[in-house]
């Protein structure tokens, strides 16, 4: 039963991702992206990574996808049909995707043949992936990188506000 659910949710992710790429409507593409993120959360649940599944739902489905939908809806467009102009390169994108898939498959098979143990100084998350163990790791050994990434994201947010606001014309 677990194997069937895994393949069903994996198919949901792949079909949603393909629909997102092939859709000519940006709003539909954003909704297909949310479905793909939700499918990945269910895959994480099947892999017993409950914390990652909840973060996937909260951050990606709840925040990123909805932010995309609001951004699309707030832009001034007369018609949304045909608003996704990037899918005219479908054949080229498909070929590049197949080449990247072949490269990734080759890397996985080579890495699987020569699997080495990770270095001893790299902090390892527990196998179960429980929220308590992961939070102890983030707030213990990885506290400084976590705070550095938070400052980087804050600087990016401030830069986006400055760029989005634009320059005001002087009244002189």
Image: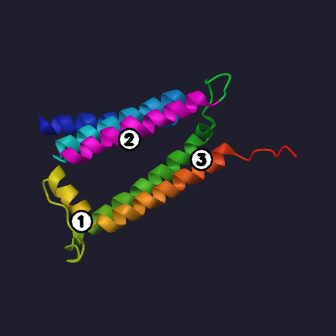
As drawn, the label of residue 112 is: 1
Front-most of 144 and 45? 144
What residue did someone put label 2 on?
Answer: 60
For marks 1 and 2 on the same chain, the one whose residue lies earlier in the sequence: 2
Quarter occupied by residue 57: top left
Q: Main secondary structure of the magenta part?
A: helix
- x and y, in percent, of residue 154 in the image: 48, 55
- Can residue 19 be seen from the camera position used here? no
For marks 3 and 2 on the same chain, the one whose residue lies earlier in the sequence: 2
Name the side, left or right, on which 43 lies relative to 132: right
Inspect the magenta stretch and tell me whether residue 69 lies in it. yes
* Dot 3 crowding, Cα within 10 Å, few <14, some 14–19, many 20+: few
Q: Secondary structure at mark 1?
A: helix
Q: CA distance from mark 1 to mark 3?
A: 45 Å
Front-most of 86 and 124? 124
Residue at 23%, 44% in the rendered image: 44
- x and y, in percent, of residue 137 in the image: 21, 62
Name the side, left or right, on which 130 lies relative to 55: left
* Dot 1 crowding, Cα within 10 Å, few <14, some 14–19, many 20+: few
Name the side, left or right, on which 69 lies relative to 145: right
Residue at 62%, 38% in the rendered image: 88
Front-most of 158 and 102? 158
Residue at 50%, 36% in the rendered image: 68
Residue at 62%, 27% in the rendered image: 82
What residue did someone put label 3 on?
Answer: 161
- x and y, in percent, of residue 102 in the image: 40, 57
Q: Which residues are magenta?
A: 50-75
């Amino acid at each position: 039963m677990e194997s069937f659910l895994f393949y069903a949710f994996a198919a949901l992710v792949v079909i949603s991702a393909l629909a997102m790429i092939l859709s000519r409507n940006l709003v539909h593409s954003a909704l297909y992206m949310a479905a793909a993120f939700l499918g990945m959360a269910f895959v994480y649940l099947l892999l017993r990574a409950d914390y990652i599944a909840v973060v996937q739902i909260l951050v990606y489905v709840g925040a990123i996808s909805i932010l995309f939908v609001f951004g699309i809806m707030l832009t001034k467009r007369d018609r949304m049909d045909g608003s996704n102009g990037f899918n005219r390169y479908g054949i080229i994108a498909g070929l590049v995707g197949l080449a990247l898939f072949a490269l990734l498959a080759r890397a996985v098979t080579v890495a699987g043949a020569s699997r080495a143990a990770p270095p001893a100084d790299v902090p390892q998350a527990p196998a179960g992936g429980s929220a308590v163990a992961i939070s102890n790791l983030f707030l213990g050994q990885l506290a400084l990188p976590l705070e550095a990434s938070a400052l980087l994201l804050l600087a990016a947010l401030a830069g986006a506000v400055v760029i989005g606001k634009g320059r005001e014309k002087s009244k002189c």
